[in-house]
Amino acid sequence: MAIISLSKAALLLLALASLLWLGRKPVSAAHLRALRTPTAILLALAGLALSITWSDAPLQQALEAWAKHAKLLVIPVLLWLIRSERDAKLAFLSFMGAQVFLLLSSWLLVLRVPLPWATSDMALTHYAVFSSYLDQSIMSSVTAALCWHLRHLAPGRWGRTLVLTVIALALANVLFVMNGRSGHVVLIALISLAIMWALPKPYRLLAVVVPFVVLLAVMLGSTLVRDRMMAVGQEINSYATVGKIDSSSGERLNYWSRSLESMSQHPVIGSGVGSWNAEYRRLDQGKGSADSQNVRNPHQEYLLWGVEAGVIGILLLLNILLAVYRDALRMNTPMARATQSVLAAMALVCLFNSSLFDATIGDFFCVTLGLMLALGWYSRSSAQTTGA
């Protein structure tokens, strides 16, 4: 976590230095003006900043919460720093190299190979490196999707073979090693999207049944996924019948119930950024576990924005997702599908976790989207120049 925080600080300092240095030169920033995502992010963060004025939380806690939301600024910062297709490709390949390093490290841990950079309990018991098994299963699923859609970028004679090998390792890691149920759901969704896009247009309507077929195949092929999915059903049933909340799903449902209750009392502008914990403790009245009293988010991104900024907050968040989607539509087909896969994974996992608010996985999505928007923009511009 310390390394991630230092890296973000270094990135922002570099961006500030770049802004001051390049501001003296006639450098084009046409992509920042043409893309919708940076504006949507700035608008959303401005709305959350305004909500500090009526937040239920102490000022320091409200500012800390806003700072966690502000990791979204990594996206426009990367778009500012990356100035050419070459820069975009180098940044993307470096990023993918890091993801492959994490994946291979996980498999080495499975094989009981001691690694000096992976000595935490999470690494030794769940084979997750520098993160939790929840985060790494999501990251590996997204990595597999990016490798698939952008396999044409693989250099050399053996490039595609290596890419397909990485995909196979990622799929096996998520399905047979990692316990993260969110990662399982994301993988099923991304496989379904890839199959849908591969279908001829007259058969695209079949995409409605594809996720169910993929889910069935995955559950039949992986006892780990099947057991985790069945556990979710049992936990939900226990919560619905006897109000049992001493489980992962039970706690989430309790958080969501309190969030909706808070939103019903402050529907338009919410209770202010950083207020979720105060609202939860006010409404829950100690019914949850002792640990839950210190939780800062409801493990659901949309409800977090709803509690903090009401319906307006949810619309601001959805506007960011829509902006990314519309920007992706302007890319060439492989880039568009890769970017839309990242967007779909993020939008889906935000239904079960506060993924943009959380540190590790939120940073992953912001960096990935920033790189994909830059790579998509410059690849498109290069194609247009070549065509001209």
Image: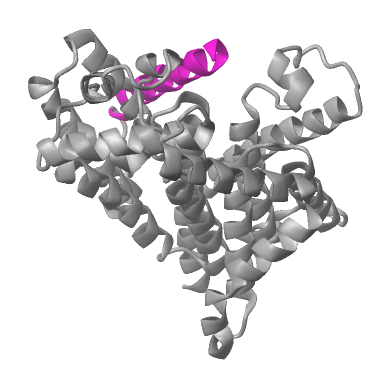
Magenta-drawn stretch, dominant element (helix, strand or loop): helix
User: Taking 229 as reference, is 13 left or right?
Assistant: left
Q: Residue 225 appears at what percent x and percent y? A: 70, 48
* Residue located 45% across and 49% down the image: 373
**Above/below status of 2 relative to 368:** above
Q: Quadrant of residue 323?
A: bottom left
- Image x and y of residue 257, in percent: 30, 38
| Boundaries of the magenta span | 1-23
Please tell me whether residue 330 is drawn above or below residue 159 in the rendered image: below
Image height of 237 relative to 212, above or below = above
* Residue 314 in sight: yes
Q: Residue at x 72, y 31 (%)?
A: 102
Residue in front for this viewpoint, 308 or 52 = 308
Magenta residue check for 340: no
In the rendered image, which quarter contains the N terminus? top right
Name of the residue lying farthest toward the front: 242
**Where residue 37 sits in the image (x, y, percent)?**
32, 48
